[in-house]
Image: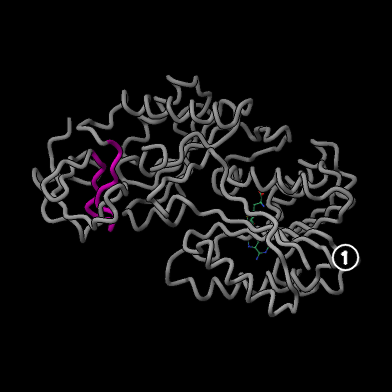
Amino acid sequence: MPEKKVLAARKRSRKHHPWVFSNEVIETEGQPETGDAVLVYDRGRFAGSGLYNANSLIQVRLYSALNQELDEVLLRKRLREAAELRATELPGETDFRLAFGESDRLPGLVVDRYGRHYVVQNYSAGMDQRREMVAGALVAEFDAECVYEKDDFRLREPEGLVRREGVLYGRPPERVIISENGVRFQVDIRSGQKTGWYFDQRNTRRRVRETVKGRRFLDVFCYTGGLAINAALGGAERVVAVDGSAAACAIASENAALNGVEELCEFSTADAFAFLKDLPRFDGEFDVICLDPPAFIKSRKEKRAGLRAFRTINALAMKALPRNGILVSCSCSHYLFWQDMVDMLTAAAQDAGRNFTIIERTTQGPDHPVLLGMPESEYLRCFFLRVV
Ligand code: SAH
């Protein structure tokens, strides 16, 4: 059982939020060290057990409303519960995000499952220190063949964590083949972006597949072809896709062949901004254009510059669409909220001199659950707009 204590006075509206910020902490007892499990008392009332980090603005991340240690027993229980949720929400799927941090009461822990291969990311010091335990739990609970740690990302720095990457268990294969809504994709665990695959877009990919029949589809920021290949399988007449990464485009072409749609798809390496500026001169028109850029806004202070980048690419795509054309506009920036996006799209439509209706919105799939009362857990927002 944790014995060290953190006494806090939290903002009242954040009573159910799993983070205690450093400016809410009044006092600590027992000299907790970074990574320790602690008991949190909020204005004298027991609030739960959490992971402590002396170096972070997020001083405690709560993982339980009870007084309990985050040991292997609890870790395995949480992972089992996470797997049960996915089995219910994504019946028949074998590849998905198994753990999505705070939403699965595993603060700062991300686990992506590619069949029996697992990729782990640690955003908190407490989980970072328990990473061997996590690997052991994945082997014991799910008979993992390999566990690979992909902790080479910028967001580790505010937590005081070094960047690192490597094998925790077994040996990752060169490529893994996964399936999503019946479509197959190759994933390069070691060299791919993030954990290798963007599971969060499964809903958007399905909607695109249902929307494009007989239409010409352009996928900008295509990565390894998630949206483009779904469009081809959904009966698109022609599919053109671009990404800045040549490695991603190479896998995208292989993925098209894996699904028997290589004749329909054309992948090329290009800077998206330059490509979109050139769109008026591009040979042929597109009825559906999809924009799925990386997070342009990574912190609050990047919001203005990021919004400008979003507005630029959206206006360029909007201008190129024919009557009844569709724009699928996505954002994975935490700080771009739904209304910010509506405002940005409105401004872009004015720049383009076009009018649109919103036909649909999609967000992260059920393997990335949004925790009510934790706005930070929702980050993926996509609009399907139709030219009027
Ligand atoms: N739609 C994809 C995910 C896109 S992730 C899917 O369904 O899987 C964002 C992509 O943008 C990455 O592949 C990255 O290589 C690419 N990217 C980032 N900056 C870019 C730029 N300036 N031009 C073109 N592509 C870029």
Q: Tell me what residue is drawn at x 8 percent, y 43 percent.
A: 30
Q: Which residues are magenta?
A: 49-64
Q: Is residue 69 shown left or right of residue 281?
A: left
Q: What secondary structure prevails in the magenta region? A: strand
In the image, residue 111 lies at what x, y percent? Answer: 48, 37
Residue at position x 69%, y 51% from top? 247
Where 117 sits versus 248, above or below?
above
The answer to whether residue 267 is left or right of residue 188 is right
Q: Quadrant of residue 104?
A: top left
Residue 61 position, x and y percent, is: 29, 46
- Quadrant of the rendered structure where residue 317 is? bottom right
Evaluate whether residue 196 shows in this view. no
For label 1, being within 8 Å of ligand 1 is answered no
Q: Ligand 1 appears in which quadrant?
A: bottom right
- Element marked by disc 1: loop
Give neighbour class at mark 1: few <14, some 14-19, many 20+ (Cα, 10 Å). Answer: some
Q: Is residue 63 left or right of residue 235?
A: left
Q: Is residue 294 magenta?
A: no
Please give the name of the residue rendered at 50% of the width and 62% of the height, measured from the top-left corner. Answer: 337
Residue nearest the viewer, comparing 196 with 61? 61
- Give the number of marks: 1
220 to the left or right of 369: right
* Coloration mode: one colour
Q: Residue at x 83, y 45 (%)?
A: 232
Query: Looking at the image, can residue 290 be seen?
Result: yes
Membership of 52 in magenta stretch? yes
